[in-house]
């Protein structure tokens, strides 16, 4: 997928004007976020589970090469095939070649963000292969010709009416809108025929278990189970960080993933795949392929300040908690991963120079850190990226700040390095702003605070600073003179 | 943190770090903070050389500009002993949680900053820790709701103490705020750089505030206060946004002692 991170502000502005989308986005808070809060409250050892989850991921990422080797060996022991792709293009080509050599006509896809990095469905269709998304949300998005809006709820921004128009060929605007159940049955009927003719499936991977060479897929619709059992070839795609050492760890990770994602204690389906069908088994594919993709993740791995982002298990809890995501929507972030975690990984994976608005588009409220099942300190990394973009100290090519900004902060520093300058600055500011103020507030301020007064009044600097007020009451002291 | 009040020996003197915003925009908050601390029997020192903790530049990414200002802060406050009290969770979090990132190439400075940070408390956190949440028995007849400032709850883990202090004010009728812990959209430079997003978040907050019907909304950070008051004024609302120190000071104003030691 081609990054459009540069358009964060303009796309955000579009969402801010779109009442229907903003209304739909409310659901991520009232549904997912509040569901997660309740699930966490109902789980007595919740904080311990998070701590354990973080420890599992920290350990795995620190020994990623070892566990990837172990995983590959064990998948092959199970008669599966493993392909390491260095980037999205390589992964895409491998899957397309595989489809061609096996004379595949129809590919069904189960939800996978990694396949979005490859823009796989479109690439298959261009090759003359039918490729259909089978997750209901993904299916809606595919019909609409869009990209996912949310990590686990790709069509969260679509109203029921829009969905009806996409799914029901006879629906015209103005008709009574069918219920969610009715719409689901429509999609189900259409997808059933595709499931029956599919000869290959592409699924994502929620967790790959190194010690057993298995993959686990979490779904609520059963499309994942259909995808792994009906077609004769199953291709699972994963980012190289989606790995955990043992089945024991899987139990911890599933508990925190599912509660954090939807507030459920367990999802409707958890599908485990241990390679292709064995001779004595009745169901399952003839071939199992695991594609493990890097696509820039080695940059995160090599970067001690950003490495923690590889702990992400893509639950979407940070999106649901984020006040910015709920106002700007998923497409504003301009690449596969939206929300707070997207603001951290997209700049590294696709380039900070174009994506610097992402880490800056945050109030640093910390809600993402608070809800993260593996305790990723997202605010700390947003600040790290802001620094890189502002000053370009680690890589001059990354610098995205303007001369004006740099001068502004330089003068700020000068003003803060002495108390007399600080008081003088306050006096100057008051002198300049007072004529345009009324009752101590300003309705239209000049730069650098002009942005503020587009929507809010700005307070006039006080007539006397606290120090000056206290001096009048003889209450301030010098640091070096205040102890007997 | 708030279950067992008065767990530590009480100090007799504290040093106030007012924060640059209180110092320049809301000096009344600083005076109220002093009044409350004096009511608790403390002598309060105000270091007249103080300016800013450097958070604005740090949060904007300009760490080389933030560095000398933060270093200056450490050098100034390490000259005094005893607790440092800050009427802002955000500035307290900067010193306690982010100086180590800002100073990371200078281990000695990280160490010195940690020693200052260890005795630096947010205002309500300080009262709760040393005096207990029932230490202030004031009276104030009014209606209010409470906004939970992000850095106070998430960076410092101070959730209940401010509410408990307010519940102890006789006559103050508190109405719970819907989504009290959701950000007001301030975020420092973010509020100026991306005003439309900041304001969209703010408007949700203001709708919830107005829905309470309370006359006042109480918060513990001047950044959030200016954001919410600026937005309320723009929409023509009469609701007042006040700092918790102001409310507490007002509630004890008839009992506060005068003639406290001066520096």
Image: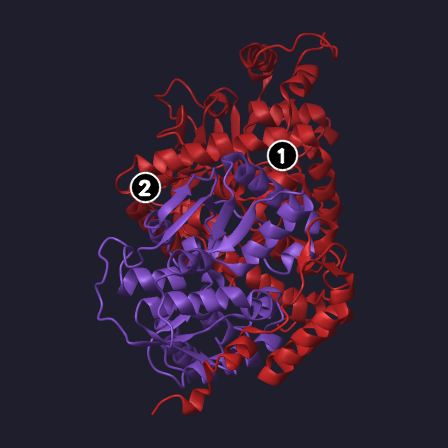
Chain colours: A red, B purple
Label 2 CA crowd tier, 10 Å (few <14, some 14–19, many 20+): some
Q: Nearer the viewer, residue A216 or A479?
A: A479
The chain under label 1 reads A
- Identify which residue is drawn at 70% across, 43% down: A12
Asked if labels 1 and 2 touch by Cβ distance under 8 angstroms, the answer is: no
Label 1 CA crowd tier, 10 Å (few <14, some 14–19, many 20+): many
Q: Quadrant of the C terminus of chain B?
A: bottom left
The residue beneath circle 2 is A252
| Image x and y of residue B220, in percent | 46, 57
The chain under label 2 reads A
Q: Nearer the viewer, residue B54 or A28?
A: B54
Identify the secondary structure beneath mark 2: helix
Q: Earlier in the sequence, mark 2 or mark 1?
A: 1
Which picture quadrant has residue A158? Answer: top right
- Identify which residue is drawn at 66% across, 80% down: A424
The answer to whether any part of residue A304 appears in the image is: no
The residue beneath circle 1 is A148
Which picture quadrant has residue B112? Answer: bottom left
| Image x and y of residue B144, in percent | 46, 44
- Identify which residue is drawn at 56% across, 59% down: B223
Instruction: Report the side of A277 relative to A468 (left or right).
Output: left
Distance CA(mark 2)–CA(mark 1):
27 Å
């Amino acid at each position: 997928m081609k990054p459009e991170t540069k358009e964060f502000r303009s796309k955000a502005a579009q969402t801010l004007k779109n009442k229907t989308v903003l209304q739909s986005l409310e659901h991520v808070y009232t549904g997912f976020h509040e569901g997660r809060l309740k699930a966490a409250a109902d789980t007595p050892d919740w904080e311990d589970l998070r701590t354990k989850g973080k420890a599992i991921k920290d350990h795995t990422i620190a020994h990623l090469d070892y566990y990837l080797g172990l995983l590959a060996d064990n998948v092959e022991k199970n008669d599966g095939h493993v392909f390491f792709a260095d980037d999205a293009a390589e992964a895409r080509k491998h899957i397309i070649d595989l489809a061609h050599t096996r004379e595949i006509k129809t590919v069904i896809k189960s939800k996978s963000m990694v396949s979005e990095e490859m823009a796989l469905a479109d690439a298959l269709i261009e090759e003359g292969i039918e490729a259909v998304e089978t997750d209901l949300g993904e299916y809606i998005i595919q019909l609409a010709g869009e990209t996912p809006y949310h990590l686990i709820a790709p069509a969260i921004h679509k109203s029921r009416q829009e969905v009806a128009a996409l799914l029901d060929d006879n629906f015209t605007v103005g008709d009574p809108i069918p219920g969610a159940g009715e719409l689901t049955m429509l999609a189900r009927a259409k997808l059933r025929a595709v499931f029956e003719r599919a000869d290959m499936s592409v699924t994502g991977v929620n967790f790959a278990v190194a010690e057993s060479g298995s993959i686990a897929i979490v779904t609520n619709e059963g499309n994942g189970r259909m995808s792994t059992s009906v077609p004769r070839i199953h291709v699972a795609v994963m980012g190289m960080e989606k790995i955990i050492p043992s089945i024991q760890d899987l139990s911890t990770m599933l508990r925190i993933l599912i509660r954090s994602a939807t507030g459920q204690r367990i999802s409707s389906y958890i599908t485990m795949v241990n390679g292709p069908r064995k001779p004595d088994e009745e169901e399952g594919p003839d071939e199992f392929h695991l594609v493990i993709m890097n696509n820039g993740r080695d940059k995160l791995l090599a970067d001690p300040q950003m490495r923690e982002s590889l702990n992400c298990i893509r639950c979407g809890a940070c999106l649901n908690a984020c006040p910015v995501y709920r106002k700007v929507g998923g497409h504003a972030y301009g690449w596969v991963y939206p929300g707070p975690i997207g603001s951290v990984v997209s700049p590294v994976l696709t380039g900070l120079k174009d994506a610097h608005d992402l880490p800056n588009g945050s109030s640093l409220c910390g809600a993402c850190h608070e809800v993260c099942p593996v305790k990723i300190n997202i605010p700390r990394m947003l600040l790290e990226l802001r620094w890189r973009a502002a000053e370009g100290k680690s890589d001059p090519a990354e610098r995205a700040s303007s001369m004006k900004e740099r001068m502004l902060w330089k003068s700020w520093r000068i003003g803060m390095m002495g108390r007399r300058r600080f008081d003088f600055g306050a006096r100057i500011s008051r002198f300049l702003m007072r004529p345009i103020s009324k009752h101590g507030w300003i309705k239209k301020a000049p730069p650098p605070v002009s942005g503020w007064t587009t929507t809010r009044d700005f307070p006039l600097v006080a007539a006397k600073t606290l120090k000056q007020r206290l001096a009048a009451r003889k209450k301030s002291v010098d640091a070096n003179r205040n102890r007997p | 943190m708030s279950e067992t009040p008065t767990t530590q020996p009480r100090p007799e003197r504290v040093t106030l770090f007012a924060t640059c915003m209180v110092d320049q925009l809301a000096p009344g908050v600083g005076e109220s903070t002093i009044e409350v601390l004096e009511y608790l029997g403390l002598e309060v020192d105000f270091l007249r050389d103080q300016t800013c903790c450097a958070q604005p530049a740090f949060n904007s990414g300009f760490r080389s500009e933030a560095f000398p200002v933060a270093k200056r802060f450490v050098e100034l406050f390490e000259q005094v002993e005893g607790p440092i009290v800050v009427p802002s969770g955000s500035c307290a979090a900067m010193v306690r949680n982010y100086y180590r990132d800002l100073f990371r190439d200078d281990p000695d400075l990280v160490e010195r900053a940690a020693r200052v940070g260890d005795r630096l408390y947010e205002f309500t956190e300080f009262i709760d820790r040393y005096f207990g949440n029932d230490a202030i028995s004031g009276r104030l007849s009014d209606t209010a709701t409470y906004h939970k400032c992000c850095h106070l709850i998430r960076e410092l883990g101070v959730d209940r103490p401010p509410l408990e202090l307010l519940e102890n004010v006789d006559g103050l009728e508190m109405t719970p705020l819907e989504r009290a812990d959701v950000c007001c959209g301030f975020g420092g430079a973010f509020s100026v750089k991306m005003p439309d997003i900041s304001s969209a978040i703010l408007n949700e907050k203001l709708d919830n505030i107005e829905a309470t019907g309370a006359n006042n909304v109480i918060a513990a950070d001047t950044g959030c206060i200016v954001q919410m008051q600026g937005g309320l004024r723009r929409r023509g609302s009469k609701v007042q946004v006040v700092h918790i120190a102001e409310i507490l000071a007002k509630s004890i104003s008839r009992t506060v002692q005068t003639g406290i030691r001066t520096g």
